[in-house]
Image (tube, rainbow, N blue to C red):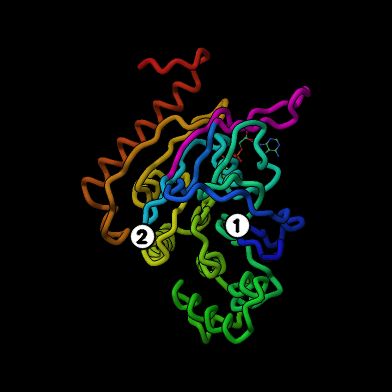
Amino acid sequence: MSEAGSPTAEPGREGPPAPVAAAAAPPEGTRPAAVELRGVTKIYHAGTPREAVAIRDVSFTIPDLPDRGEICTFLGPSGCGKSTVLRMVAGLAPQFPPTSGSVHVLGREVIGPGADRGMVFQDYTSFDNRTVLANVTFGLECEGVPRHRREVEGREWIERVGLDPTRDALKYPHELSGGMRQRVAIARTLALKPRIILMDEPFGALDPATRLDMQDLLVRLWREVEATVLFVTHSVEEAVYLGDRVFVMATTPGRIASDLRMPAADGPARETQIEPWFHEQVNKLQAELERIEAAAARPDGTRGR
Ligand SMILES: Nc1ncnc2c1ncn2[C@@H]1O[C@H](COP(=O)(O)OP(=O)(O)OP(=O)(O)O)[C@@H](O)[C@H]1O
Ligand SMILES: [Mg+2]
């Protein structure tokens, strides 16, 4: 894939991500983890008066569950390094490369962006001068997929994300609502069939009702594409509803403070999120978050109650 066609290309941002060469394949007979961070630290301006530790010693393993994938949500206060972790997995500068530690995706060391990972950002990133269809088929075009095939696939994806393949396909991003634009961004990412989907507060700017619709859409598409999803959010409800697993992060330095399993939420977002068990989980997670933030605020960093 050409560098501009990388699923992690960010429309409207400076320059395309660096091209990637293939790293060594994992040994046969083992199923490598979908994502593995080992002791990842990122320090900006190291050794200068502006030195800033974004994340320190972050390690986690997300297995590559066959025929299913998993949704892992990342929750934590502003500045704790959620975007840093996600962009580290995406291989996007300046977060990537780490100052120390390593990032592996599907058994290969990450050395830059790659077609195995697709990213959806918060700010409705689309190419403003391209129609919905041309946005959705952008990556396929870069991959050299012939025009007819990519337009057929593009229209299928437009329909899958709940837009109208006839009416909406030829609109431009400025003619769409925030929710519609985010559907376009999701379609553009998923059209490339990445095994790992990275989402950085994708629904953060949407109104509550649209947000619930988008959560339903994501769960439906995730079941279809069977990918591993890393999803950053500020919403405890969203973290519980979407997450099979929730990583709670803390600040100063940014780190993983808790790694919690969540019960599977099978029903639609609106119905599930008013159920008693759901409230119980939200309250538990909220309490955990507050405990972690209180501990981080103590000068000695102790976790005493
Ligand atoms: N390019 C940079 N140079 C210096 N420091 C940076 C840079 N990018 C991020 N940081 C710092 O790294 C830390 C983690 O930032 P990051 O954007 O990952 O946080 P976040 O958890 O995503 O926050 P938010 O919830 O507000 O999006 C912050 O303290 C931030 O100031
Ligand atoms: Mg962020």
Q: Quadrant of ligand 1?
A: top right
Q: Residue at x 50, y 76 (%)?
A: 158
| Magenta residue check for 49 | yes
Task: Tell me: 253 left or right of 259.
Answer: right
Q: Which mark is residue 181?
A: none
Instruction: Looking at the picture, tell me which residue is in the foreground, 54 or 37.
Output: 37
Which residue is labeled 2 in the image? 67
Nearest the eye: 188 or 78: 188
Q: Is residue 100 above or below residue 232?
A: above
Q: Which residue is mark 1?
A: 123
Q: Which residue type does callout 1 highlight? A: Asp
Q: Is residue 72 left or right of residue 175?
A: left
Callout 2: 10 Å neighbours few (<14), some, many (20+)? few
Q: Residues within 10 Å of mark 1 (few under 14, many from 20)?
A: some
Residue 289: where, in percent of width, then height?
Answer: 40, 32
Magenta residues (range): 39-62
The residue that appears at 60% across and 76% down in the rendered structure is: 132
Amino acid type, mark 2: Asp
Name which of mark 2 and mark 1 comes first in the sequence. 2
